[in-house]
Amino acid sequence: RKEVEQDPGPFNVPEGATVAFNCTYSNSASQSFFWYRQDCRKEPKLLMSVYSSGNEDGRFTAQLNRASQYISLLIRDSKLSDSATYLCVVNTGGGNKLTFGTGTQLKVEL
Amino acid sequence: EAGVVQSPRYKIIEKKQPVAFWCNPISGHNTLYWYLQNLGQGPELLIRYENEEAVDDSQLPKDRFSAERLKGVDSTLKIQPAELGDSAVYLCASSLVLGSVTGELFFGEGSRLTVL
């Protein structure tokens, strides 16, 4: 089993739709969780950290479920500019070992 | 403030040739990472430095890959000899780590390697 798993997609959604991505992780001791965004042929950039209580940033909501070992990202009222690959990142080892999932590709269409 | 700087941006070489990538992290960042990213995949960690020390190089293919971070600042990743399967984007990232708190990773634009 991979340390961090994501559905690769692609998710093709119309503008204005709500879309959710899930990510599962295998190390129950993981403490840090993030969502990164990567545009085509660009480097990954931090979208948001994921906190235990869940957190929201505008149209984006991240949640953590420790019991089931997954994190989620919800995007409301999706925009064309949201089209990108969303990478789940988890601290999977001692220290600061950050492991990336394979990424979920989102395509927002008119 | 300058971000993470990598060079070269693109490199095309023939198999069995050597290649080197250079990374200058964000000033003050104590942790530096080299990741490899294949098309359609997430970044995979090759090596992580905390200051000058390589604290995690378990996924670095040491028969052909080597890395160094002199004086805890710039870093170089070398492949010798390169194989066809090494074609990928090599990403350098840096962060400020305080104790067990993981800071945001800032990535460079990457070095795209093509091995013919």
Image (cartoon, grey):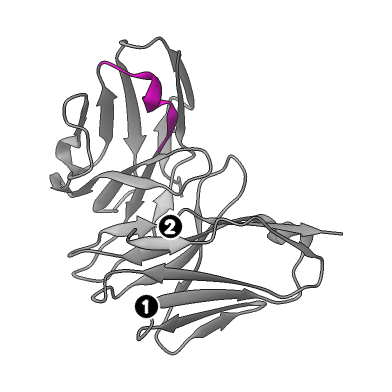
Pick the front one: A48 or B64: B64
Residue A78 to residue B107: above or below: below
Residue for badge 2: A101
Mark 1, Cα crowd under 10 Å, few <14 / some 14-19 / many 20+, is some
Residue B83 shows in this picture? yes
- The range drawn in magenta is B81-90
Residue for badge 1: A69
Pick the front one: B55 or A71: A71
Q: Is residue B16 left or right of residue A43?
A: left
Q: Is residue B106 left or right of residue B56?
A: right
Q: Chain of mark 1?
A: A
Alpha carbon separation for disc pair 1 and 2: 14 Å
Q: Is residue B85 magenta?
A: yes
- Tell me which residue sits at (57%, 82%) in the image: A56
Q: Is residue B11 magenta?
A: no
SS category of the residue bearing label 2: loop
